Amino acid sequence: MGVPLAACYTQTRAVHTPARQLSTTPNRFPKTNRPRAVVPPGGVSGRGSGAKFTGRRRALSDKEAADPADNSTESEEKSGECPLGFGKNGRITNAVDGVKKSIYLSFMQSASPLTMEEAAASAAAADPKDVMILDNAVFLQSLKKAIEDPVGMPAAILDWHMKVDNDTVGIKNPLGPGCVSTIDPRVVEYICKTNAQNYRDRLLPPIFNLVLKDLGVTGSQGEYNRAHRKVCQKPFINNNFLKTFSTVVESRVQHLCDSWEMASDAEVLKAAGHGNTAETPYMVTDVDLHSQHLLLDIISPISFDHSFELLQKSREVITGAEQKFKPNPMLEAYHRSAEIMGEVFITPLPLLELGAKLGIGRLRELTAAYDDLEKMGDEIVKNRRAQHTATLEKGGEIEQVCLLDTMLFLTDPDTGERAYTDEELWGDMNDIMAAGHQTQAATMTMALLYISRDEKVKRLVEEEVALLGGRAPTFEDVSEGRLTYTQHVIKEVLRMHPPIHMFPRLATAADTMPTGHKVAAGGIIFLSTWA
C-alpha cells in the first residue's frame, strides 16, 4: 500500500534543463514539433524582407491585395523595366525566382531523407536577402545572457532566433571563427547525416582540454576519439552483455522502488496511529539525489564491476534509519565538476587562468575535482588489473563482466604492446560514468516531477505499470510494447528537458549550407537539441 505519486513532494537538486515554451509553426513540418521564435518590435538591422522558407510574406497594400496582377504591371511600367519581362521585377525573372523558391521550400518541407544534390539545389536557390547574419552587438548581448542563464550557451542560441525570427543564423564572432546557429531539423539532418563527413569533429573548449587532458570519449577528437568510441560501444551491442546490463537495471530499480514503498507504508501507519485518516499522508524526498544514486549503482558495475552501495544509503535516508546522509566522495566530485564546468564552459581559458592567479574564479576548484576523480579512478583500474593478473598467474581464465574487463588486456596489433594506459582507461570509464548517470538521473527526476503534477498522466502510467503485477519493469516489457504510454511520457520529458542542450560541430572544409549560409573551414556550427 503505497502513497500516491501526487502526494509526494519532491525536493530536487538544481537540474539545469528548463523547458523552452515555444510555439510551433503549422503545416511546415507536418511530422515534427518545431520551435518557432517571435519577432520583437523593431527586429534587427540588416534583416532581409524577402519571402523566406518559413512561408511568411510582406504585407500587401489594399490596392495590391485587390488586384496584384494589375499592380505588378503598373510597377514594371513605372520603373522602366524590360518589356519582355527579363528586368529586376519582370514576369520571367519573377517566374525564375518562384522556381528557385519552390526548390527551397520543397527542401525545407520534405519528410524524405535529404541528399547532397537536394541540399546543393536548396543552397543555390536561397535568396541572399534571407541569409541572416547577426552583428557583433547581438552576439555579445546573447553571450552575456548565456553566462547568466543556468542552461548557458543553448539559451543564447534560442535568444538569437527569437530576436530575428529566423531558424538559421550566421554570426560574426569577434572572439574567434565564424559561426552558424540552427534550430531547424532539416539543417540538423544535413550536418549530422547528409554531410556528416564534413562535420565529424566536435567543438571542445580549451577548458575541456585542460581538465580532461585530451582523453576519454568526450575529451578527445579525431581518430583517437573514433577508435575509443568503437571500443566502448562493443559491449553495449553484445547480447550477453545486454542481458547482464538489463538484469542490473531491473534489480537496482526494484531496490529503489521498494525503499519508497517502505517509506510510504510507514507514513500511512504513522498517520493512522495518530488518528489522522482524513488527509493523505505524504513524504518529502530528494528525488534527484536518489535518482543519481540509482544510476551510479547501475553504471558502476557495468563500467568496472564495482558497487558504491549508494542505493542502500538512499534506503537508510528514505526510511529514516539514518537522518543525515553521508556524501560519497566520487559523487560529490562529479557534482562539483559538472556544476563548475557549466559555469565556465564558454569563458576563455586565459581569463580563467588569470582569475586563478588572482585567487578568484573556480578554475582551481574545477581542476581539483577532476584530480580527485582521476585518483579514485586510477585506484579502481590498478586494482582490477592486479586482480586479473593474479587470476592469469594461477592458470585461470578472465571472465569479462564489465566494460573495463574488455579493455584491460587489449593489445596494439602493430606493436603487441598494451593498447591503453591506465590513464586512458580511466578517461573512458569516467566518461561512461558521468554521461551514464547525470543525464539519465535528470530525465528520471523531471519525469517523476511531471507525472506527480498531472493526475491524468499519473493515472495512465500507474495503470500501465500495475499490469506488471507489482514487479519492476524489464527490458522485455519495453521491447515488447507493454509500457508504450510510459515511453511516450519519457520521450516528451526528453523533448522538453533534454539533458544535453546543444551539439556544436566544426567544419572540416568550407561549405555552403542548404540555407545559403557559407561556412569556412574551422567554422563552428551550433545545433540546438530543441530543433
Image: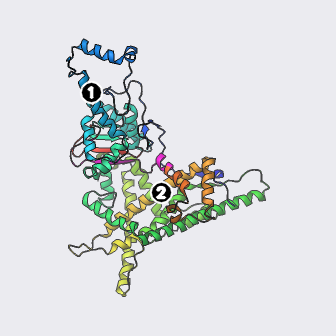
Which residue range is magenta in the image?
492-513
Q: How many marks are shown on the rendered structure?
A: 2
Give neighbour class at mark 2: few <14, some 14-19, many 20+ (Cα, 10 Å).
some
Point out the frontmost of discs 1 and 2.
1
Task: Left or right? Give the position of 25 relative to 139.
Answer: right
Labelled disc at residue 95: 1
Say which quarter of the image contains residue 285. bottom right
Identify the residue at the far bottom of this view.
395
Q: What secondary structure is found at the residue carrying circle 2?
A: helix
Task: Left or right? Give the position of 108 relative to 300.
Answer: left
Is residue 257 at least partly visible in the picture? yes
Q: How far is disc 1 from disc 2 in space, using C-alphas?
A: 52 Å
Task: Left or right? Give the position of 331 relative to 103.
Answer: right
Task: Left or right? Give the position of 346 relative to 223.
Answer: right
Q: Nearer the viewer, residue 422 or 161?
A: 161
Q: Nearer the viewer, residue 101 or 46?
A: 101
Labelled disc at residue 392: none
Say which quarter of the image contains residue 101. top left
Picture coordinates of residue 242 (x, y %)? Answer: 44, 68
Please report whichever mark, 1 or 2, sits nearer to the chain's N-terminal start.
1
Picture coordinates of residue 203 (x, y %)? Answer: 30, 49
Name the quadrant of the C terminus. top left
Labelled disc at residue 440: 2
